[in-house]
Amino acid sequence: MKFTAVLAALATAVAFEAQAVLATQDKTVRAVSPWQDDPYDAFVSFALVAVPPLVVVIAGRLPLWRAPGGPDRQQQTARAAGALTGLVGLTLAAEWAAVGACAHSAVWSGRTTALIAGLAGQTILTAAVAGTLWLRRAPRGTARGWRHDWLGDVVLLAGRVPLARRWATPHVAVWVRGHTTGVFAAASLLAGIGVIGAQALGEGWTDPLLIGWAVTVVATSMFAFSVATNAVAGFITRPARTRTARTAEAAVLAGSVALSLMTAIRDSVWTAVTGRPVGSVLGLVCLTVGAGLAASALTAAVLVARSNGDTG
């Protein structure tokens, strides 16, 4: 059943998150982890932030599994579980890449062996869940017939809670659907401020440029992830948008992805150009944000040119 497959995806993601937290937050374990540095750590760090909210929203929808609109809900929830499993699988692949490259092999110890054993176990579980979800996938094109979304379920659940029903109303849901991009952007910015604020306090960061850059990286990556998963799982039904709006969003998404990727490989790129790793915050910002802006501009130019060609 899809319900069982979704539960398995949630359990696998929780187990992944537990090991990821141990490998990144425990200093003694992190010191012997093959994936303690970028580019591998970039995948792990992103998953640490992105997995929990996705787990929460999927788990929060399960009590309504058989409510009116069940077929839509089941398909959407299974697709969200697939996106969650895909994110976990991509991160595990990055960790295996670190193991394959023997990164930091000079400091490997018994703890490293335990980490790799845990990685192997999680890989098997994730592959099994991914296979199960794939076999139970809905036919292609089903999403075009959806008449329900997750936001509607929020209103339905909130109606059962006296305090929540005052703000989670159908009118509010309509407003959110009309401002989906802004809602995703605001939520992503709050996530970036929260994550980097905590990190800055914990590690004693004082450079405003560094803090602002780090918030930007987290916020843009979360925005891209939110838009992509919404397209897959139908969290919020979006009204028809103008071609200009679609082009602008695509450009922002391309820039966000480029910024995140360049952040992961920044030292390799900078070393290839200058012969040494990035040595200043300003250089870091110029390299990564510059790559994001270039990708945005190129994407916008291509889409505008294609649009002009279609109307010519």
Image: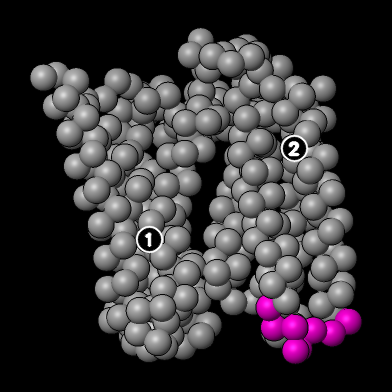
Count of numbered labels shown in the rendering: 2
Q: Position of residue 241 (x, y in %)?
A: 26, 25
Tell me which label, 1 or 2, sits earlier in the chain: 2
Q: Would you place residue 162 above or below residue 225 in this image?
A: above
The residue at the point 36 percent across, 46 percent down is 253
Q: Residues within 10 Å of mark 1 (few under 14, many from 20)?
A: many
Task: Determine the image quadrant of residue 256.
Answer: bottom left
Which residues fall within the magenta stretch? 103-110
Assign the N terminus to one quadrant of the image. top right
Q: Residue 130 carries which label?
A: 2
Q: Residue 259 carries which label?
A: 1
Q: Is residue 206 part of the magenta span, yes or no? A: no
- The residue closer to the viewer here, 60 or 93, is 93
- The residue closer to the viewer here, 163 or 140, is 140
The residue at the point 86 percent across, 56 percent down is 121
Question: Please, which residue is most extreme toward the left here?
Answer: 312
Task: Determine the image quadrant of residue 220.
Answer: bottom left
Q: Residue 10 carries which label?
A: none
| Amino acid at dot 2 | Ala
Is residue 25 visible in the rendered image? The answer is no
